[in-house]
Amino acid sequence: MATTGVDTMATKPSQIPAHKRSAAMEAVEDIIYGSIAGIVGKYIEYPFDTVKVRLQSQPDHLPLRYTGPLDCFRQSIKADGFLGLYRGISAPLFGAAAETSCLFFFERIGREVVYSSGYCSRDRVLPLSALWFTGAFSGAFTSFVLTPIELVKCKIQVPTFANGATPKAPSVMSVIRDVYKHEGVKGFWHGQMGTFLRESGGCAAWFGSKETTTKMFYLLNEKSATSQTEKDALATEALPLWQQAVAGASAGMSYNFLFFPADTIKSRMQTAPVGGSAPTKSFWQEGKALWNQHGLRGLYRGCGITVLRSAPSSAFIFIVFDGLKRYLPL
């Protein structure tokens, strides 16, 4: 950050204390701790995610099956029990580990890109504008890992036949076989455009909002310090847990709200039955059809519950990841 004098934690975004480790060890740490944090977050959010996908994927040509999130919860629990909301979680658990570890891993690579470009020297802390960029960089690359995983997850959460009938819940392997049989390897990246837009834009907001809120808390805490000793202590201490939770929650809510329409279109594409005679719609065709049928409201169907579940999930993800990095460095 282009400032004079010595940086303190109150004048810079959150940063895990530096340890002299190789780049390879840093990468291993990002992957392992990111995976753990992602799995914790997925167990918290998955029932809400199931409801979100079911709300998003309701057909245009039929009356809405669910009147809202609470009605969807009620009907889903009545039909399948509470554990039914965790249907298909095996693939998402793997996906959550892969996604979160990739996000932190590629975010670190994004920082290296910024340093290598000369935008900011390595002995200075990255400004918030650069951290929003590294988030977008991370999300763009992670989207290619995530699309196949989410496609399998969506087809398990909302199983359909080509004739529109609703079968029993398929297994992960049966979905993989079905997609490969009818669409080949390329079929696993159906909906990639939606994932790319959601992840690149959403992760810019995810990392950027978290760092912006964290910086705000450090500035507020520094102002409340009564001595230089307290200010120096703040420079090395982690934020109180509640402030870490608020920063993480703001990240999740920003991520999900800002680019929710892209996620809605992606979910509709990925829950479409494979092997039918109907032509496959592109991202823009699916979006246009949804807009013509339901307008802006249709693009944000299920947004409320998604934003609600993202707050505790992202809070836990960042608390777990930052805590492991700080207190259990490899």
Image (cartoon, helix red, strand yellow):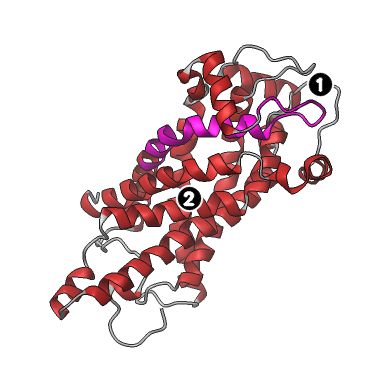
Is 61 contained in the magenta span? yes
- Image coordinates of residue 156 in percent, x first then y, are 59, 23
- Image coordinates of residue 265 in percent, x first then y, are 71, 41
According to the picture, the residue beneath numbered tag 1 turns out to be: 276
Q: Nearer the viewer, residue 270 or 165?
A: 165
Q: Is residue 151 visible?
A: no
| Tag 1–tag 2 contact (CB < 8 Å) | no
Left or right: residue 86 versus residue 284 is: left
Rendered image quadrant of residue 234: bottom left
Q: Which mark is residue 252?
A: 2
- Image coordinates of residue 117 in percent, x first then y, are 52, 74
Quadrant, the N terminus: bottom left
Label the magenta part by its dominant secondary structure. Answer: helix
Q: Which mark is residue 64?
A: none
- In the image, residue 36 sits, relative to residue 201, either above or below, namely above
**In the displayed image of the protein, which residue is found farthest to the top?**
168
Residue range (magenta) = 37-66
Q: Nearer the viewer, residue 315 or 33?
A: 315
**How dense is the environment of label 2, judged by Cα within 10 Å: few (below 14), some, or many (20 and up)?**
many
Q: Is residue 308 visible?
A: yes
At numbered mark 2, what does the secondary structure look like: helix, strand or loop? helix
Spatial separation of the CA atoms under disc 1 and disc 2 = 36 Å
Q: Amino acid at mark 1?
A: Gly
For image coordinates 59% across by 46% down, the residue present is 143
Q: Nearer the viewer, residue 244 or 77?
A: 77
Pick whichever of labels 1 and 2 is earlier in the sequence.
2
Left or right: residue 29 versus residue 183 is: left
For image coordinates 70% across by 19% down, the residue present is 160
At numbered mark 1, what does the secondary structure look like: helix, strand or loop? loop
Is 167 contained in the magenta span? no
Q: Amino acid at mark 2?
A: Gly
